[in-house]
Amino acid sequence: MLTAEQVMATNKANVETFFGLTSKAFEGVEKLIGLNLAASKALMAESASQTQAVLGVKDPQELLAVQAALFQPLGEKASSYGREVYDIAAATSAEFGKALEVQFGEAQRKFLEAVESAAQNAPAGSETAVALMKSAVATANNVLETAQKSAKQAAAMAESNFKTATANAMEAGKTTSAKKR
């Protein structure tokens, strides 16, 4: 049976976890806002520079050269921006994952303690039921651990695929840009 102190301690831990996760979420949002502000500022500066370059064009050949120079870095910049957004999202997600793992581990530990306590206080002749309950808990833990490992492997594979796709897109952009020249 849970005491009032245990309930209060659990509630306090849950509130601390909630505020910790909220803080991590805000940190992620702040990073995204910072990234967007930096990208907007760079875009404004580049737009001004590019406008000056286009206004300074004297003949059609020079216009083609200026256009080619303007469009070449766009793919790289878009890819870089996407990579930074992904990195921020992945870092924030990892922080949430760690916190949830800790919370789940603690809840699992408390549940196992409750099972052990119940087993010690069980009436004579209930050993089979207690053993069955312990076996069910162990099986559930194994299934959960396997699911967590699979989720981590899937996330690692998705990250690898994202990085490969980004690298391929950048290479394709470079190749296309080189052909236009």
Image: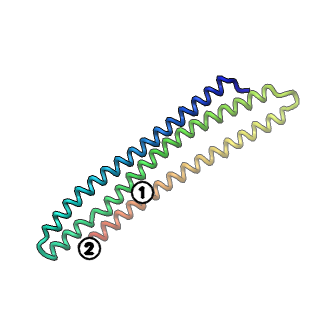
**Do residues under tags 2 and 1 come within 8 Å of each other at their CB atoms?**
no
> Left or right of 176: which side holds 129?
right
The Cα–Cα distance between marks 2 and 1, rounded to whole angstroms, is 26 Å
Amino acid type, residue under disc 1 in the picture: Lys
Residue 132: horizontal and vertical position, in percent?
A: 80, 38
The residue lying furthest to the bottom in this view is 60
Q: Secondary structure at mark 2?
A: helix
Amino acid type, residue under disc 2 in the picture: Lys
Q: Quadrant of residue 171?
A: bottom left
Rendered residue at 26%/54% (across/down): 42
Q: Which residue is mark 1?
A: 163
Question: Looking at the image, is 115 positioned above or below residue 164?
Answer: above
Residue 56: horizontal and vertical position, in percent?
A: 13, 67
Classed neighbour count for the residue bearing mark 1: other residues with Cα under 10 Å, few (<14), some (14–19), many (≥20): some
Rendered residue at 23%/73% (across/down): 181
Residue 180: mark: 2
